[in-house]
Image (cartoon, rainbow, N blue to C red):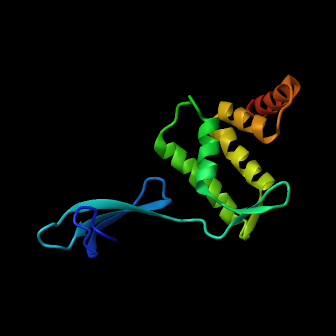
Amino acid sequence: MRCPVCNNKSTRVVDSRLAPDGMSVRRRRECERTRCGFRFSTVEEVEMLDISVVKRDGHREAYLRDKLTNGLKKSLEKRSYTNEQFNKLIHKIERDVQKLRSGEITSEKMGEIVMKHLQTFDKVAYIRFASVYHSFEGLEKFEEELRKLVKKHK
């Protein structure tokens, strides 16, 4: 890890702590160059590698966390949540994908996993996501999904 101040290649870990979400490690580092000695923090987390998403038309594309993040942020627009809560949501979704122990996942399965977690995270975001995911054409589909949601949470 290079020092962000002097670009020295040699830094040492001073302290390591498990993040509150339990999904990442926060490391306190120090530049080993005597004249610099700058201290900074890094975060280490599990990265999902080599997972392909099989789209509805059959073509495959690499899993990109940014696509998931952007979709969730659209659903959560103008909703109240913290960055920590959002990161936990992303980690839970990715953990469920990793539990499948497969090199690929269908976009349908990915959508189901996302909706499962959104349902408990934020009901409004869940409905927004479901409306795009299921391509709701009219109010009847919204009403049907709302009835299901209300029934589950009574």
Q: Position of residue 83 (x, y in %)?
A: 47, 43
Task: Classify 50 as above or below 61.
Answer: below
| Residue 2 lies in quadrant | bottom left
Is residue 9 positioned above or below 23 on the image?
below
Name the image quarter holding residue 136. Answer: top right
Residue reaching furthest bottom?
10
Q: Quadrant of the N terminus?
A: bottom left
Q: Quadrant of residue 18?
A: bottom left
86 relative to 125 in the view: left or right? left
* Image point (62%, 58%), residue name: 64
Q: Position of residue 124 (x, y in %)?
A: 67, 30
Looking at the picture, how far across and down is residue 137, in whole percent? 86, 30
Q: Residue furthest left?
A: 35
Which residue shows up at 17% across the image and 66% down it?
A: 37
Q: Residue at x 62, y 42 (%)?
A: 72
- Of the 4 image quadrants, the one containing the C terminus is top right
Residue closest to the eye, 83 or 152: 83
Q: Is residue 20 left or right of residue 48?
A: left
Name above or below for residue 46 compared with residue 122.
Answer: below
In the foreground, 17 or 108: 108
